[in-house]
Image (cartoon, coloured by chain):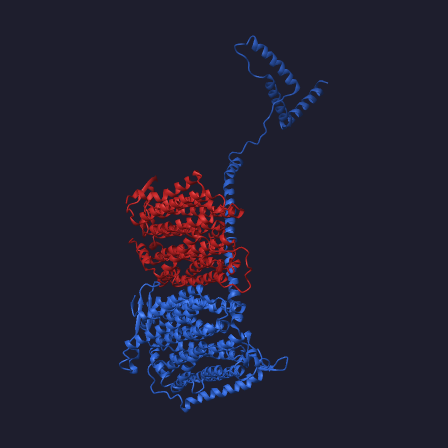
Chain colours: A blue, B red
Amino acid sequence: MKGDLVLFHVIWFPFAAAFLCYLTGKWHKMIRDRFLQLSVILEMGLMALAAAAYFQEAGLAADPTISSFHVGELQFMWEGFCMQGLYLKLDGFRLLYGCIAALMWMMTGIFSREYFAHYHNRNRYYFFYLLTLGSTMGVFLSGDLYTTFIFFEIMSLTSYVWVIHDEKPAAMKAGEIYLAIAVIGGLVMLMGLFLLYDAAGTLRMSELHDAVRSVMQEKAGQIYAAGFCMLFGFGAKAGMFPLHVWLPKAHPVAPAPASALLSGILTKTGVFGVLVVSAEIFRYDPAWGRLVLYLGTITMFGGAFLAVFSIDLKRTLACSSMSQIGFILVGVGMMELLGAENALAVRGTILHMVNHSMIKLILFMAAGVVYMNLHALDLNEIRGFGYRKPLLKGIFLMGAMSIGGIPGWSGYVSKTLLHESIVEYAEALAVHGEPSLWISGIEWIFLLTGGMTIAYMTKLFVAVFLEQHPDRQQEYDAKTAYMNTESMFALLVPTVLLVLMGFLPYHTMNRAADLAQGFLHGEMPAHAVHYFSLTNLKGAVISMTIGALVYFGLIRKFLMGKDEKGRTCYLNLWPGWLDLEDLVYRPVFAKAAAALAGYVCGIMDRLYLVQNLLKAAVEVSAFLSRICDYLVDMVLVLFRSTTHKSRTERRVYLIGSRVSRTLGKILDQVVWLMNHTIRRNNPIERSYVVTFAEWEEMMSRTSRLISASLSFGLMLAAIGLALTLAYLLWW
Amino acid sequence: MSSVCLVLPVVLPILGGAVMPLLHLPDKKRNLCLEILVLLTSAVAFLCVFRRPEEGFVLFHLTGNLDFALRIDGLGSVFVCVIAFLWPLATLYAFEYMRHEERTAGFFAFYTMTYGVTLGIAMAKNLVTMYLFYELLTLVSVYLVMHPMTKKALYASRIYLYYSIGGAAFAFIALVFIIIFGGGTTDFVLGGVLDMSRIGDNINIVLIVYLLAFWGFGVKAAVFPFQGWLPQASVAPTPVTALLHAVAVVKSGAFAVMRLTYYCFGAELLRGTWVHFVVMSIAMLSIIYGSTMAVKETHFKRRLAFSTVSNLSYILLGATMMSTQGLLAGMAHLVFHAFMKIGAFFSAGAVMHQSGRNYVDELNGLGKKMPFVFTVFVICGLSLIGIPGFAGFISKWNIAVAAMELGSEYPYAYGAVAVLLYSALMTAVYILTVAVRAWFPDKGSIKEPEEAVTDPNWEMKLPLFIFAVAVLFWGFCSEPVMRLLRAVSQGIL
């Protein structure tokens, strides 16, 4: 462990506080609530300490010139932590975002006490709330991508608990997709990091650019593969199309303080990653820039499109978040495309991130106030809630104006910068004589989306704060104590900051941009941007006109109607069929791919393979051994039928005729007598039965032969002739 | 330290286990004796590792120059340490788990004997000795599988027996060829003992023999297509499935393959040959198969068994990279997986023991009733997925590094990285579905069970606690152990 310990304190403190808070909660609930508030305030204090150390390091206290902003950096290193080591760093951008994260947690933490007063499972919530704080801080302070990844994973898993906090079916379903995207994104990103590490040999952000450039020639494919994997992972967290599916589902179902954090800061961790990948690995790479730009444009427009149709307060805000992330990604794309002259895009991107964090903090907490009182978010139910609540109305209006990009509010500044960067690029293309129609198209989508932003924010504002509820207006107006002082403080502080940013852009936002742009290697702009010049105002005016057209032409005409009692109401025309989750992801991955993989593995299972193989083997071996078995037999049979064939002739048994047998027997008796008497010393041992039978047989055979022969016939004929002759002579 | 001492860790548990049922001690006393015996064995084993005698100890000569000999080298000491560390804890857990079972005398006798035999495999000096112990391991552990004596268990034990004995027959072929081509010795030497001049033109025969032996020893490591016995064998009592079928028996298979690859045939000889790609493909296929089937499976323990199939092949995938880095990665996963899987299995066993629930969809909301067990399960599960900060990540990273190293030479190895990604996703699915069900049930999905389910007693908790701590510790601070393993893989230690 070496370096500036204050960075490490910022990280470990929330983790330790999480466990302490949990234990405290087991013991006493009220003390736990206070402890939580204390710990988020302390965290803010720690961040302030880090900031002080940073400015001291940068020598700013003595010499407040802008050029020295990104000279000094705080660093902290822990070798061998989780194998690759932990490396924390604090530069201008990290300082800015660390402070915003701490501020957001502080405000939502203060707000939570009232909001969660009647909730269950608060202990669990607070535990994961603080864990997520620590890990988010870790992401923003990380100096190498490995450290980023570790904290990113912790953050993904711990924030899951926020999403499902209600444990209602909708929350569980949203949680499912949130977790799925988080885990898949995380693992794919890990693969990307791994490929990058293998190619470049380092994950240290400050060394990445040189390392990548030196191997870009031979390993371009691998580096791009790594880049896509990382864009997948970080983009999923940021809510980038087409991985945005979880965002409009998960943000609305979480408790409001959690929604504010999910929208305002957790998406920014994804953006942070995209920034690192874009600025360090693919610095000034136009191909990469186009990819991010296109994806950003779709995200930007898609989010706004969905938001226009939504009639749920928090869902509209969530879709709006998606859209704003799209704006930021467009900025990232422009930053790449513009090459070294990307000051406007860099500053616009950073400032829009800051703006969006602050705005969403305010708006979601305001939505939380509504929900806390009414336990409803449907515009038809909550309309008129803010009719007689000037404070809430004012706070919400500030947020709405800012996000709508109305001149005089902070959103205008960042959107103007982003718009200018697009215009600048279009001009540059025109000068070089390259086709610039597509970039003009993107500019128009940009302005159109800006208009839609104004339209849906107007829709929300009008519904909740200007219209009256048809039945329950009295009841709503009676709720005068709708939030306590703590919550009011939590809402007011960021609002005041936001308003200051908008009204004094040169003193606040420019300074913030100066501080942070070193992170993206942005140079100071060639000339100071006059935010309120006519050309810049023109874009805002176009957007406002479009906004008015959309609001009056589309929302009030087609998206509002009469309910069964004849009162005007907001129609739910939410384009659910556009949901990529049900349209593509579930059918493809959960059904088709799963079925395929399951089927293939089922075939691979022993039932089919080994068993059948075994069966086949047994059959074959049985067949072979039977052949072997018969082999000897067959040889024997062969011999028996050839060389060792038994003789075929019949054995002749000599029997003889009755006469010869009788004679033979008599002679045998005689011989027996003789053998016992006179020939006792030399007995005759033959049987005359057999001898006579042989004789007889021989005679019969001979006579047969003779009688059958020609000579015998001739002889008989001769005898006949002789007899005839004799008769003639002597008779 | 005299080399005779090497005999002790092998003989002590075998004799002790055999004698124990003859004494007819009451359960409590027997358990105490067994625990002391196992602890004593572990102590001797550790002593043998840390003050290890350089020369081996020859027990007796079989025939010719086939010796029955014991010796501890680097790889062996890694395995010895894992086994010797886990066994006393698993025994402790087993006492509690088996309290209400019948026929415990026979069970513990064989359980303890298996310890000695496994140590024998780890400490074998040459292939002959290892082969003998390998066969013996099948024989002593088959009773443990059939212990429930149900029809299913008997069937499973028969399958186990067929597969293992059949596999060993293949391994025997290798033994013969090693003797022929290796100049008569079967001793384990890092880099292999084969003599190129003796092989001559017969290189393809050697490779075929290696493939046969890979499958033969791989049967115990549940390598495709011989994985069928492992999920079936999960009918055995949890101490068996956890220790034997996640660590001792199956790791013996993986260990034997490592011995075969790096210490008999030699990685250099095999690297880049056709058989290299065949065995790598087998390992990849097993990983995909195991993790997909685990997602399909709804029985808690069988799901973990399928997970074991895929994780064992991680070890083999590391080993089949045929490089120093590959051996390192394989060993690292061998060690880390032992801890995280035994932790996961013991959690599953604790759930079954305490609540009698076997299927994943019965686990709704159990996390709140058994927070300790499910915390351990989540830690081990996240480690299995490969989340940084847990031990499993370290070994998977190293496997991927080995694959990339090989990939620059043979691009086929890049496929291994993709397989790792796929498997990690599947692991996330089959682990997180359990964890989410247990901790965050849908509202209204829990039918309040009548019986009060609680965390188990300390005998079950202590091992779980130690495993969880080990997994976390190595996740955060892996360098010391990795340095040791690296030395082993380079042959320094």
**Which image quarter is the N terminus of chain A in?**
bottom left
- Judging depth in this view, the residue of A137 and A347 nearest the camera is A137
Q: Quadrant of residue B443?
A: bottom right
* Residue A702 x, y percent position in the rendering: 61, 24
Q: Is residue A517 above or below residue A694?
A: below
Placement of the C terminus of chain A among the 4 image quadrants:
top right
Res B331 seen here: yes
Q: Is residue A440 above or below residue A695?
A: below
Residue A86 locus on image (x, y percent): 33, 66
Tell which of A258 and B305 is nearer to you: A258
- Left-right relation of B254 to A658: left
- Extreme residue toward the right, this view: A731
| Viewer can see residue A322 | no
- Up-down relation of residue A438 to residue B319 (above or below): below
x and y percent of residue B334 in the render? 38, 55
Q: Name the residue furthest top.
A: A678
**Res. A573 image quadrant:** bottom right
Q: Residue furthest bottom?
A: A534
Residue A588 on image: x %, y %: 52, 67
Residue at image position (39%, 59%) is B392
